[in-house]
Amino acid sequence: MKIKKSSETTREKVVEKQINHQEVRKAKEELDLIMEKVLEQTGLTEEEYIKTFINARKVN
């Protein structure tokens, strides 16, 4: 069994965080595109759209 050096572990963590950051950025871009389509189809502003969810949550 090979014991990892501290620098190897640190590098792995940095790479892992970079991958996670890239995944988050890609997901946000996809969500932004979906939101643009929803707003276009509903004719609502982003603020109006969010308020509908806030009001729906208060009712439930």
Image (cartoon, grey):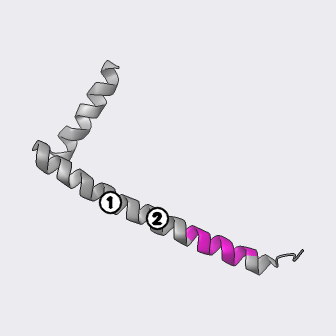
Residue bounds of the magenta highlight: 9-17
Tell me which residue sits at (21%, 42%) in the image.
Answer: 47
Most foreground residue, 54 or 28? 28
Please indicate whether residue 22 sits to the left or right of residue 48 in the image: right
Amino acid type at image mark 1: Glu
Please indicate whether residue 21 sits to the left or right of residue 26 in the image: right
The residue furthest right is 1
Would you place residue 7 above or below residue 52 in this image?
below
Q: Which residue is mark 1?
A: 30
Of labels 1 and 2, earlier in sequence is 2
Tell me which residue sits at (53%, 70%) in the image.
Answer: 19
The residue furthest top is 59
Circle 1 crowding by C-alpha within 10 Å: few under 14, some 14–19, many from 20? few
Q: Which residue is mark 2?
A: 23
Q: Quadrant of residue 51?
A: top left
Residue 7 rendering spot, x and y as whole percentages: 76, 80
Circle 1: element type: helix
Circle 2: element type: helix
Tell me which residue sits at (74%, 79%) in the image.
Answer: 8
Please indicate whether residue 20 sits to the left or right of residue 30 in the image: right
Residues under labels 1 and 2: Cα distance? 11 Å
Circle 2 crowding by C-alpha within 10 Å: few under 14, some 14–19, many from 20? few
